[in-house]
Amino acid sequence: MTEKELICVNCPMGCRVKVQLDGDKVISVSGNSCIRGKTYAEKECVRPERILTTTVKVEGGTHRVLPVITDKEIPLDMIFDAMEVIKKVSVSAPVSEGQVVVDNILDSGASVIASRSMNKA
Ligand code: SF4
């Protein structure tokens, strides 16, 4: 049995949450003031996820790169593979904010989308 202590990042309260684990199995969660803290701590201990933000090359735009973001969290252990996919991508201007740049990246269920618009140069 192991115990992990996390700080919940879901709101400014920053509760200190303790998670008792038996291998990868969550036995108990304590210290959270609401259910969101429990869900966060369980996910963080078993398979953490993150929003990925980066840039892709853009051709014919007012800038050389376009900021992009995943439209939902993806497993942290997929981040490096996702970056390898994104590194090979380029888009052509004009681009609209929210435009899908990579659909369902690595079958994660998340798409990489433009986080801003960009006009043609
Ligand atoms: S457990 Fe609930 S109250 Fe505490 S930091 Fe997380 S979201 Fe906020």
Image (cartoon, rainbow, N blue to C red):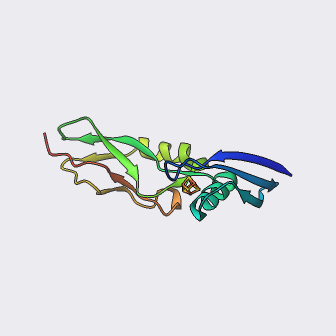
Q: Which of 44 and 10 is in front in this view?
A: 10
Q: In which quarter of the image is ligand 1?
A: bottom right
Image-based side of 117 in relation to 52, left or right: left
Residue 62, how many percent across, how many down?
17, 38
Q: In the displayed structure, does residue 93 sit left or right of residue 38?
A: left
Image point (29%, 57%), residue name: 98
Image side of residue 20 versus residue 115, left or right: right
Q: Residue furthest left?
A: 121
Compared with 24, 5 (above or below) is: above
* Number of dots carrying numbers: 0
Q: Where is residue 87 in the image (x, y as percent from the top left)?
A: 42, 41
Q: Residue at 74% of width from left, 46% of height from top?
A: 4
Residue reaching furthest to the right: 1
| Residue located at (60% from left, 49% from top) | 15
Give the camera-side residue of 54 and 27: 27
Q: Which of 29 and 54 is in front in this view?
A: 29
